[in-house]
Amino acid sequence: MNLSPEAAAIVALNLAEGIGSRTYAALVERFGSPQEVLCAAVSALESVGGIGPRRAAAIKLIASGGTLDEEFALAEKHSINIITLKCDSYPPALKNISDPPLVLYVKGTLEPTDAIALAFVGSRRASLYGLRATGRLAGQAARAGFTVVSGLARGIDRAAHESALLAGGRTIGVTGSGLLDLYPPDAADLVDRIAASGAVMSEFPLRFPPVRQHFPRRNRIISGLSLGVVVVEAARRSGSLITARHAAEQGREVFAVPGPIDSPSSAGCNQLIADGAKLTSDLADITSELGVLEDRVDLPGVSDIADLRSLSLNVVERRIFDALDTNGLYIEDIISRTGLEASAVSATLLILEMKRLVTQMAGQRFAKA
């Protein structure tokens, strides 16, 4: 495993249960580097707030044994990449959340285009309505160039992954256990298919078992990887609402698919909408809310994307929309910039106005809304 000594020490600390990013930061602040943390005496480790005898002993056990070498050997055997906070390949959006994972175990590949990602979460016992809504939205998102992120669970999660794969798009699955002890076990085939054209990841060591209380932790990764989270079918007490809360705290957008008012499985979504989440029935509802990117990005077949609203448009609509600015252009200038016929430009501008993406200004000028 080709990791720097610092990165290898981070992986070692991650193997000691109970060492998260905040505890890691406290340890490094006290000792200067992750390598020095591993060399520290038990008594010195115990002096750091939040460590205590149990975690100090766990750190020394990892530092003195062959556990790290065994972990690297397992990762190499199963073609799993190990990425730490100090690696250039660590997802930038995830690095900026308040509690980023120290380590990501990745089966498959991460791509720069994964910066344009949408998360889908919802009930494990999804209704036919929920599955249809997920298939529609996740399929639209994948075809538009979004990477679809979800949690590999049965129901809405699995429908999101399957729809993205069916659309020929990228998808990322995040699990709450080690990649060599996956839950649920029947996700193995899906994991292989996702890894072939996307990635499956976990912050937990490879053989870490599926512990119930650790699954809510993976939700912050699902939202952290994404520009926004789409909640489809969630009861009032649902893990999906934890993901929505993480998204709001991380500055991500929250979208919710409305459901029947007498359906308990939609009560959480309906409450999210009442609390200010964007009511969502189509990809345009999502792209209109996400709006302009801080940094331009290239997607397969679409270069230099700056405004995500263009992803929900057809080829002609996108060409005209991308030609516009916020200052306004005359129709003649739009025709010149796009090379389209005057009739096509006029008709398309009307459609874009109806979609509230374009506004007509004084003097027959048109601008992005």
Image (cartoon, rainbow, N blue to C red):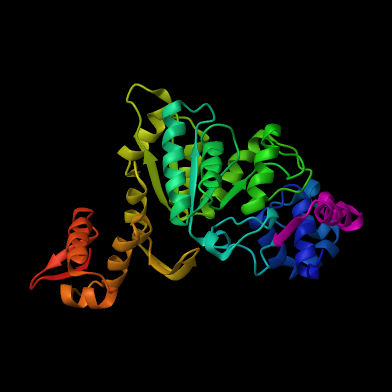
Residue 323, can we see it?
A: yes
The secondary structure making up most of the magenta span is: helix
Q: Is residue 340 above or below residue 289?
A: below
The structure residue drawn at horizontal position 53% and vertical position 52%, both measured from the top left corner, is 169
Image spot of residue 134 (x, y percent)? 45, 38
Q: Nearer the viewer, residue 150 or 50?
A: 150
x%, y% of residue 340? 25, 70
Residue 260 appears left or right of 110: left
Range shown magenta: 57-83
Q: Which quadrant of the figure has residue 40? A: bottom right
Q: Position of residue 43 (x, y in %)?
A: 83, 57
In what quadrant of the picture does the N terminus appear? bottom right
The residue depicted at 55 percent of the width and 43 percent of the height is 161
156 on left or right of 74: left
Q: Position of residue 63 (x, y in %)?
A: 87, 58
Label count reads 0
| Residue 63 magenta-highlighted | yes
Q: Is residue 329 left or right of residue 168?
A: left
Residue 233 can be seen in this image: no
